[in-house]
Amino acid sequence: KIVSRLITIMIATNENLILESILTDNSWKLYKFLTALSQNTTLITHAGFINTHNIVVAHTNTVKHKAGDEYAYDKTSYKILFEAQGLKLGYFVFTIQKQPIIKITEKTFIANLILMSIAGLFSFLIANIFMHKLLKRLDIVTLNAKAIAKHEWDKIMPCPTEGNDEITELINTTESLMYDIKHSIEEIEEQKNFYQHILKSIDSLIVICDKKMRLLYQNDHALAECILEKNKQKITESLLSTLMFNIKHRNTSFFIPLSCSLPDTKEEQSVLVN
């Protein structure tokens, strides 16, 4: 069926050539067509054309089937009717080499298998290269994030960007965010150092606490030793009690006696709270 379908297509494609050869009795041109037809596939060993009276017009096996002889059929012979405008002009006859379907498709299967293997290997290499570049860029983003967390600005590395895909956009956004964070932290550090420098230059004792009176900041002052616990994490209980009493009674300015003295005097001191 495969061979018959193939032959039918080739005959239909060259119908004008065949018709001209038959009507002009040009056996040589018909012979060349039959030769090309038999060489088109390994399944056809010989091809020929006979008229409606079973007489050979042309045949590729000129030894067994000579022109003008009556065509002798055998078990491997097949014929296809050729007609034009409803008129039967003869038959194409073929000697077909029968093969199992496995042998027919063996070469095609092997060729397709090789092509699929090459395509699979090529796809794997492309995917491997792509993933390597992608992971390399994402590793740089991770290392940069760790460097920012540790304020190690000199370890921030530029991320190579390629193309205009979602990954590149993510990397660009992340990198821009990193530098924004870096600049913000640097500004905060500068402001912190600036205000600390001012606070250290003030002669008065400055203590900053939260709402629960937990110590947030104190400047470098001798009285700090007198009002803070030894671990310097909170105000002493006695001082805290006095503070809370005055705050509760809305006293905006008051003195608190200290239990210690300044290094340059042994007299007990009091601190004015505003």
Image (tube, rainbow, N blue to C red):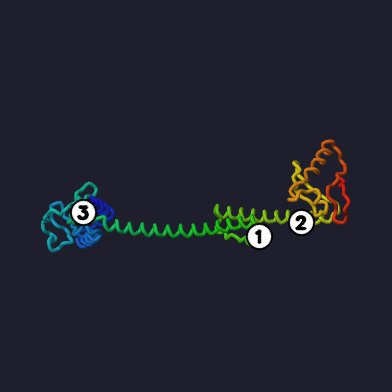
> In what element is the residue under mark 3?
loop
| Residue 124 percent coordinates (x, y) | 42, 58
Tag 2 or tag 1, which sits nearer the N-term?
1
Q: Which mark is residue 121?
A: none
> In what element is the residue under mark 2?
helix
| In this rendering, the label closer to the viewer, 2 or 3 | 2
| In this rendering, the label closer to the viewer, 1 or 2 | 2
* Residue at the spot of label 2: 193
* Residue at the spot of label 1: 153
Mark 2 crowdedness (10 Å alpha carbons): few <14, some 14-19, many ≥20:
few
> Looking at the image, can residue 274 be seen?
no
Callout count: 3
| Residue 213 percent coordinates (x, y) | 76, 43
Is residue 235 found left or right of 166 in the rendered image? Answer: right
Q: Residue furthest front?
A: 266
Amino acid carrying label 3: it is Pro
Tag 1 or tag 3, which sits nearer the N-term?
3
- Determine which quarter of the picture holds residue 72: bottom left
> In what element is the residue under mark 1?
helix
Q: CA distance from mark 1 to mark 2?
A: 18 Å
| Residue 269 percent coordinates (x, y) | 87, 49
- Determine which quarter of the picture holds residue 154: bottom right
> Looking at the image, can residue 156 be seen?
yes
